[in-house]
Image (cartoon, rainbow, N blue to C red):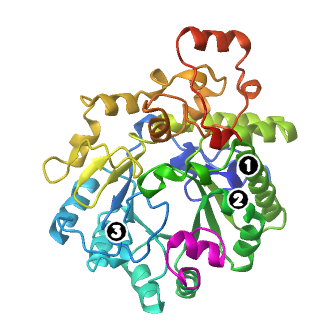
Amino acid sequence: MIDIGKLYCGGTSTGDALRYGTDAVPDRHGNRPHEAVGLASDRRPIVVWSTTRTCNLNCVHCYTDSCNVAYHGELTTGEGRALIDDLATFSIPSLLFSGGEPLMRNDLFTLIEHAANRNIRPVLSTNGTLIDRAMARNIKAAGIVYVGISLDGMEDLNDTFRGVKGAFSRAMKGFENCTAVGQRVGLRLTLTRSTYADLNRIFDFIEQEGINRACFYHLVYSGRGVELFADDLTHRQSRQAMDTILARTEDYFKRGLNINILTVDNHADGVYLYLRLKEKDGHRAEEVHRLLAWNGGGAYSTGVGIANIDFFGNVHPDQFWQDYTFGNVRKRSFGDIWLDESDELMHGLKHKAERIKGRCRLCRYRALCTGSMRVRAFRTYRDPWAPDPQCYLTDEEIGLDPEKINELERTGEIYQMPEELTG
């Protein structure tokens, strides 16, 4: 995650220590809160648990290819509680209850309460359509610290993406009901060519609805989203989207609005933010450079700082890579699976900086991004160490001069970007 408010505007948020190891970037008033201690490489992973594959919607980009049917063989309540105990022993910081639609699992609150009682920070990812007032109270009572409700644009556009008429209005009621009971809630939105065109209107909507946190996700090719190249942002659109996100977030801060804006699943955003900030405030830009370097971008994300456990107990590199499994928690503890580098992919993910190829290998900002999303590279080039095709930074910006391009040609590391992204 790239915390736009913290890095670009000098704000703070609850995830500062986890994402950047420090909150030492001066805030708007010049204050420097205490600095956290530790290395990004030492972090235990945030675990995304796909608790059920069943979902009441039919989203066109669903990474789990979920439908409104029962799937047999999912972890039972007892197995779920045992898994949570195992994760607590491994000292994970947070467990994200996801799906499918997790609220369709009838023992969900029992599992959430168990996680909270084991000092694991429980988070809920939902489409929001099932959250009436009673459900909102149950979510808060169970101990959920944050609810992320997914939208994919305004009104009819969202309903088209979600595959169900009325999904937008029902999700809006979910926001309203969470807010009414004092439950912390935010918006999750995938950046596509359709939502990109509506970005300013979405920012207006965030303010009008009193939403105080929004995460803009870059599209990851997985599940039903694997064929969506044609709806992914071009590199030019990605830059323009970031310009809008930076400008609108800065406007929020200047007006004293407490709205936390983040981008997710493309660490090139951090480099782009740094370059824009460097034009305005060189001193703060260098502080931000240090924070991004501590975070390491993709170096400590998939396979290190983020993990996925699916409906059946299979452990995956992240939630978008469910076609590759390291092991199953019904047979081995999560910690044993996660720390076992005998698997070639797991070893590589733990040491990404040594594996990445092409323009990512020679990028002057490699330490800030480390190749971003490996699963996107794999989906595009069938090589997990190839460049991320969603890197929209120019050769000039990353220091890729003719001599370096010649080197990549000699070593066979020239990767052709998909036409859909470079148009």
Which mark, by number, is residue 196? 2
Compare residues 59 and 200 and report the one nearer the observer: 59
Residue where numbered disc 1 is placed: 237
Q: How far separated are the C-alphas under marks 2 and 1?
A: 8 Å
Q: Residues within 10 Å of mark 3 (few under 14, many from 20)?
A: some
Residue where numbered disc 3 is placed: 116
> Can I make out residue 89 in this image?
no
Q: Residues at badges 2 and 1 in contact (C-beta under 8 Å)?
A: yes
Q: Secondary structure at mark 2?
A: helix
Q: Is residue 402 left or right of residue 47?
A: right
Which mark, by number, is residue 368? none
Rendered position, 384 above or below 194: above
Question: Disc 1 marks which amino acid?
Answer: Gln
Question: Disc 3 marks which amino acid?
Answer: Ala
State which quadrant residue 372 falls in. top right
Image coordinates for residue 38, horizontal then vertical, percent: 47, 38
Point out the residue furthest to the right here: 280
State which quadrant residue 289 falls in. top right
Residue drawn at 54 percent across, 44 percent down? 36
Rendered position, 32 above or below 84: above
Q: Secondary structure at mark 1?
A: helix
Mark 2 vs 1, N-terminal side = 2
Q: Is residue 380 left or right of residue 263?
A: left
Q: Secondary structure at mark 3?
A: helix
Q: Residues at badges 2 and 3 in contact (C-beta under 8 Å)?
A: no
Within the magenta stretch, is there residue 133? no
The boundaries of the magenta stretch are 150-169
